[in-house]
Image (cartoon, rainbow, N blue to C red):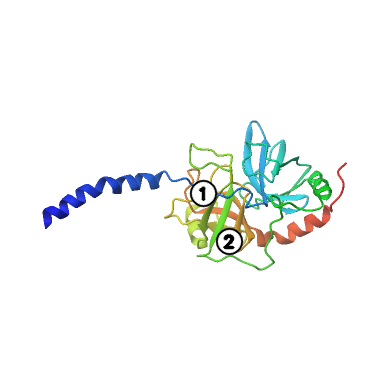
Amino acid sequence: MQPLLLLLAFLLAPKAQAAEIFLAVKIIGGHEVKPHSRPYMAFLRIRISDRKRCGGFLVREDFVLTAAHCWGRSITVILGAHNISKHERTQEVIPMKTAISHPNYHPKVNDIVLLQTPVLYLQLQRKAMLTAAMSLLRLPKRGEQVKPGMVCRVAGGGRLDLSTSTDTLHEVELEIQQDEQCISCYRRGYNGTTEICVGDPEMNQSTFKGDSGGPLMCVHMAQGIVSFGNKYGKTPHIEMKISSFLPWIERTMRRFQLQRPD
């Protein structure tokens, strides 16, 4: 009996090793989504000394919410897109007019900005409605909170691993963590009042470079904004807690009423 068991163990070993290698190179982004199934998503093309990419999401006909560190000399907002390398008929490509960062923004602190695009509002007025490929994402009500153990979704067009980029929208499921996980991982400090700790450190799933500014979706609403994490894509990472910024978001959008561009 023992020789047979040893033979089986020998035959099965290469398959087990192959499985381990496959899991090690699994994409960080999870999986590609069905085209236009996340119609609130925005791709941001940002020009600084070179070009970079971020995500964002449509929260009013003329406002996209994203991370404040997604900033440059010019920002182009692309809505209604699944593959930004193609000229899809659903796409709207719009230059940003105004960026309103949180007044207490510092690198990795209060990392939230509203981008106003009045031209988009006029285009939507002409169409008379938001399309199936372009719609608003609901924000939480004041006091609504996510809890550790909840599994939420994050979508983005960032890198799939250290060396692989993509032009299509991907999504991954991530579990909300106890605040202590991020307190122990990030020396610069972690503020559970304004931030959410996301991603099981035992799982090879995470957002990565280029996903900043995208929404953390929990029960069909945006609860967080992808902010920052480990440079190698290891979890947990930190997201801005939208519910704590609601007064500022509402006040800002009231101040910048829908209007025709200059």
Residue lying furthest bottom = 143
Q: In the depicted view, which residue is nearer to us: 112 or 52?
A: 52
Q: In the depicted view, which residue is nearer to us: 109 or 213?
A: 213
Going by the numbered disc 1, the residue's amino acid type is His
Dot 2: what SS?
loop
Q: In the depicted view, which residue is nearer to us: 92 or 224?
A: 92
Going by the numbered disc 2, the residue's amino acid type is Gly
Q: Quadrant of residue 25?
A: top left
Quarter of the figure with the C terminus: top right
Residue beneath disc 2 = 192
Estimate the x, y position of residue 55 in percent, counting from the top left: 63, 46
Dot 1: what SS?
strand
Crowding at mark 2 (Cα within 10 Å: few <14, some 14-19, many 20+): some
Residue beneath disc 1 = 31
Q: Is residue 106 left or right of residue 237?
A: right
Residue lying furthest top = 49
Estimate the x, y position of residue 24 in percent, counting from the top left: 39, 45
**Residue at (65%, 50%) from the top-left corner?**
111
**Residue at (58%, 65%) from the top-left corner?**
146
